[in-house]
Amino acid sequence: MSEQKDSEAIKMKEFLRELPAIHEIQKTEHYKLLRSSGKFSDKLLMKMVRDSTNYLRDKLVNGDMESNRCTEQEFLRIILSELEKKTQAYLKSRLTNLINGTGTVLHTNLGRSRLSELAVNHVMEVAAGYSSLEFEITDGKRGSRHDIVENLVKETTGAEAAMVVNNNAAAVFLILRALAKEKEVVVSRGQLVEIGGSFRISSIMEESGANLVEVGTTNKTHLFDYENAVNENTSMILKVHTSNFKTIGFTETVATNDLVNVKNQNPQVILYEDLGSGSLYDFQGIGIGDEPIVSDIIESGVDLVSFSGDKLLGGPQAGIIAGKKELIEKLKSHQLARVLRVDKMTLAALEETLKIYLSDEQTLEKLPTIRDIKKPIEVIRAQAESFREQMKDLSYEISVEDGTSQVGGGTMPDVELPSSIAAISHNRFTAEELAAHLRKGTPPIITRVKDNRVIVDFRTITDEEMPLVVEGFKYLR
Ligand SMILES: *Cc1c(COP(=O)(O)O)cnc(C)c1O
C-alpha cells in the first residue's frame, strides 16, 4: 500500500519535471502573438503564463487529470488554452453594457437610470477636453463648480440655492454633520428606514455626530409628538421619505405643512426633508404613484431638501441639495463638501438632464427614465409580439401575456405598471439554465424566472436593442 503510494509520488515528480519550461512557452506562436498584440505588459503576460502552468500542475497534483496519458505536447496545449482563457478574461471589461429584460426601470443592480443621449454626448465632449469646470470664461477668473448646475436646480425646484454632492447618502451625511453635529435631530420612528446596501438613517445619524431624538411609533407619529420633542436644544427636524416600503392600515404621518408650522414657532430649528427619489416630474398627474414633486415641497416652506440624481430624475449618480441660501452657503464652505464633491462628468450629465426638465412635455420623453415609466402597454406588447414572431420555428415556446413592471430603485414600491411580457420556455433547457445562458451572452440579457419560464418584460428594452435580444435567443436555439 505505502509502497504503491511512494511509487506514485515518484511518478508524479517525474511528470511535474516534464511540465514545459517558461522559455518553451515563450517560443510558441501563441505566446508571440499575445506579446506582439501590445495589449499586455511583459510583466502581466509572464504572470499569466506562470498562473497557467500552475493551473496544470495543480490539476496533476490533485489527480484531476490522468498524468500518465499526457505527452509534453498535450501539457503545452493545456497551458496555452488556459493562457488564452486568462488573457481573454483580462481584456473583457468588468463593467459592461447589458440588456435589462426585467422591466424594472430603475434597477439598482443594473446601474439605475439610463442617461439621455443629450447627457451622454455632453459627458463625452466634456470628458475628452479641457473644460470650464472651475473657470469663469467672461472674466478669466477662478470659478466654482457649484455654479454649473445651481441655476438649473433653482429653476426646476424653485429653491433659493442648491449644490450637488456624490449621492443622496452623502447629502444626508453632509447636512447632518454640517448643521446638526452634537445637536438634537427629531425624526419619526416610522421614518428610521434602511435603504438597500446598508444605508440606515439611524447609523448615518450616528456617524454624523448628530443626536437622534426618536418620536412617535412605527405606524403612527402625531403632530404633538414633534411639538413635545422640540425644545431649545433641537437643531433640526428631519423628515425622511420612506422610499422602499409603505405602511398600510392604522397609520399616521405628519404632513410637511404641519412640520413647517412647528419650525416657524421655533426659529432655530431647520426643517430638512430627505426626499429619496425626488421627482421633478408630476407622475401623480398622469396616474402613476403619489410621489411628491420637489418644487411643491420647497414651496411649502421646508429649509432644505435632498434627493438622488439617478432615481426618478433620470440623471447621473448624485445627491442634489436645494433650499435656503444661508444654509446652502454653510454646506458649500464645509470641509466635507470638498470630500463629497462630484466630478466634471457627473456635472456634464446632470446639466443636460436638468435642462430637459425646462423644455416642453414632448422633449421630456428624451429622458429614458420618464419615457420608460410612461411607456404604453400597447407599445410594449407590440415588441413582445414582434419578438415571438422572430423566434418562430426555433426551439422556444413563447406566449405573450399581460404582466406588471416595477419602477425600482426603492421608489414607488406599491406601483405596478401594466406591462406586456414574453414568457419563454425552451425544449431542452430549464428556465434557470436558459436564464444563465442568456446572462453569459454578448451582451448579457438579464431576465426573470417565474413558474419555470423565462420572463422578458420589454418595457426596459429599446427598439435599438431588439435585434440584440433576438440574436441572443437565436444563438441558443
Ligand atoms: C435612495 C435613498 C437614499 C440614498 O440615495 P443614494 O443617491 O442612493 O445615495 C437616501 N434616502 C432615501 C430616502 C432614499 O430613498
Image (cartoon, helix red, strand yellow):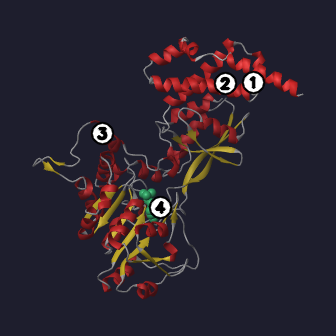
Q: Which SS class for mark 1?
A: loop
Residue behind mark 2: 56
Verify CB contact (< 8 Å) between mark 2 and mark 3: no
Which residue sits furthest left?
139
Q: Are marks 2 and 1 in contact (CB under 8 Å)?
A: yes
Three-letter amino acid code at disc 2? Leu
Crowding around mark 2 (Cα neighbors within 10 Å: few <14, some 14 to 19, many 20+) is many
Residue 207 image position (x, y, % from top left): 44, 66
Quadrant of the image containing the C terminus: top right
For the question of whether residue 451 can be seen, the reply is yes
Amino acid under label 3?
Ala
Kindly report which numbered mark, 2 or 3, lies closer to the viewer in this rendering: 2
- In the image, the residue with mark 1 has its CB under 8 Å from the nearest atom of ligand 1: no
| Mark whose residue sits in front, 1 or 3 | 1
Q: Which residue corresponds to mark 3?
A: 127
Q: Is residue 76 above or below residue 330?
A: above
**Ligand 1, image quadrant it occupies:** bottom left
Q: Which mark is residue 288?
A: 4
What amino acid type should be assigned to the residue bearing mark 4?
Ile
The percent position of residue 286, horizontal first and vertical second, equals 43, 61
The mark found on residue 65 in the picture is: 1
Element class at badge 2: helix
Spatial CA span between label 4 and label 2 = 58 Å
Left/right of residue 266 with respect to residue 96 in the rendered view:
left
Q: Earlier in the sequence, mark 1 or mark 3?
A: 1
Question: Which circle, 1 or 4, is nearer the viewer?
Answer: 1
CB atoms of marks 3 and 4 within 8 Å: no
Task: Say few, some or many: other residues with alpha carbon within 10 Å of mark 3 (under 14 / 14 to 19 / 20 or more).
Answer: some
In the image, 367 versus 178, the foreground residue is 178
Residue furthest right in the image: 1
